[in-house]
Image: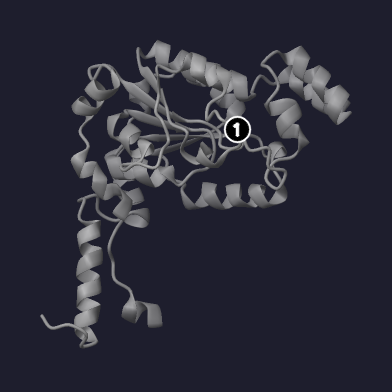
């Protein structure tokens, strides 16, 4: 009740910068063809962290193993000591490498350019923010620095589709830009119970079919390469519902509403005069 009295609606401030970002000048800046589709891939932020508070051995000895089924089955026997996991590896194709190849195949099928942005990998260990296969498959690697606007916002402003390898708040930026969004759902076997709980919350909270496509990794690897980009276009009704629930209007005036709200509150308390 107290919050109702003191709160002021502003909207999603981060998206205001999109008013100053245009696709064609950005494509010219980065050497991309503005007349061809652009897919923005935000790769898995767990890959370079080796954070045992988030991931479990299955992540390293199954998900991060090379795409060959027999190699992953051998790793399951050697490191996980699990015949059941070995049998599963022989049945399923999904792993970090096969996901990367599926994204590249999807881009080739749709004659699209593939742009990668590290986003959360800025706090990963090591000198590189991308893996070898990501570097090999990408048409452009956007750097992650301390500048403004952030490289993710530059990518969103150019993109026709955003693909994210983990549950990310980047979905808010994509919605603000009107760009359809795909989440690749890595199996929960890879994560600690805490992260599994976060995934359940995220999938429920951001469930909005017609804009957000939450695709299990195995389905992604098997079917996404032949998917048509046009079939993933954001439904205007679903997009507006998502914005109403999560970001507010995409009018690029949220920052001004913050300032107006501060001024109004100061005036109400007699700190400043109109």
Left or right: residue 186 compared with residue 143:
right
| Left or right of 147, for residue 207 | right
In the rendering, at what x and y percent does residue 252 appear?
Answer: 21, 51
Q: Residue 112, image x and y in percent? A: 35, 16
* In the foreground, 227 or 127: 127
Q: Which quadrant does the N terminus fall into? A: bottom left
Q: Residue furthest bottom?
A: 270
Query: Does the image show residue 124?
Result: yes
* Residue 107 spot, x, y in % from top left: 41, 16
Q: Residue at x 30, y 20 (%)?
A: 37
Foreground residue, 243 or 154?
154
Query: Residue at image x 25%, y 72%?
Result: 262
Q: Quadrant of residue 249?
A: bottom left
Question: In the rendered image, is residue 222 in sight?
Answer: no
Instruction: Give me the residue at 36% from left, 35% from top.
Output: 180
Question: Which of the image's four quarters has the C terminus?
Answer: bottom left
Answer with left or right where residue 240 lies relative to residue 260.
right
Q: Position of residue 222 (x, y in %)?
A: 57, 19
Residue found at the very far left of the displayed protein: 274
Where does label 1 land, which residue?
A: 126
Q: Residues within 10 Å of mark 1 (few under 14, many from 20)?
A: few
Q: Is residue 183 above or below residue 135?
A: below
């Amino acid at each position: 009740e107290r919050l109702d009295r003191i709160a002021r609606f502003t909207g999603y401030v981060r998206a205001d910068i999109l008013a100053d970002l245009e696709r064609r000048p950005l494509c010219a800046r980065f050497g991309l063809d503005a007349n061809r589709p652009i897919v923005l891939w935000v790769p898995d932020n767990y890959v370079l962290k080796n954070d045992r508070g988030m991931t479990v051995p299955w992540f390293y000895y199954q998900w991060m193993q090379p795409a060959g089924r027999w190699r992953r089955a051998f790793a399951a026997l050697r490191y996980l000591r699990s015949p059941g996991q070995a049998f599963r590896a022989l049945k399923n194709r999904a792993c970090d490498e096969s996901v990367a190849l599926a994204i590249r195949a999807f881009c080739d099928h749709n004659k699209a350019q593939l742009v990668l942005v590290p986003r959360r990998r800025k706090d990963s260990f090591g000198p590189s923010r991308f893996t070898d296969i990501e570097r090999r498959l990408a048409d452009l690697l956007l750097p992650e620095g301390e500048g403004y606007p952030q490289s993710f916002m530059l990518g969103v402003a150019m993109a026709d589709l955003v693909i994210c390898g983990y549950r990310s708040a980047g979905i808010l930026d994509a919605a603000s830009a009107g760009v359809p969004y795909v989440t690749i759902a890595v199996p929960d076997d890879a994560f600690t119970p805490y992260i599994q709980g976060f995934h359940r919350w995220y999938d429920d909270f951001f469930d909005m079919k017609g804009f957000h496509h939450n695709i299990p990794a195995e389905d992604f690897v098997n079917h996404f390469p032949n998917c048509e980009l046009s079939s993933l276009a954001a439904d205007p009704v679903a997009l507006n519902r998502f914005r109403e629930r999560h970001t507010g209007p995409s009018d690029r005036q949220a920052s001004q509403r913050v300032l107006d709200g501060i001024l109004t509150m100061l005036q109400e308390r007699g700190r400043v005069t109109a």
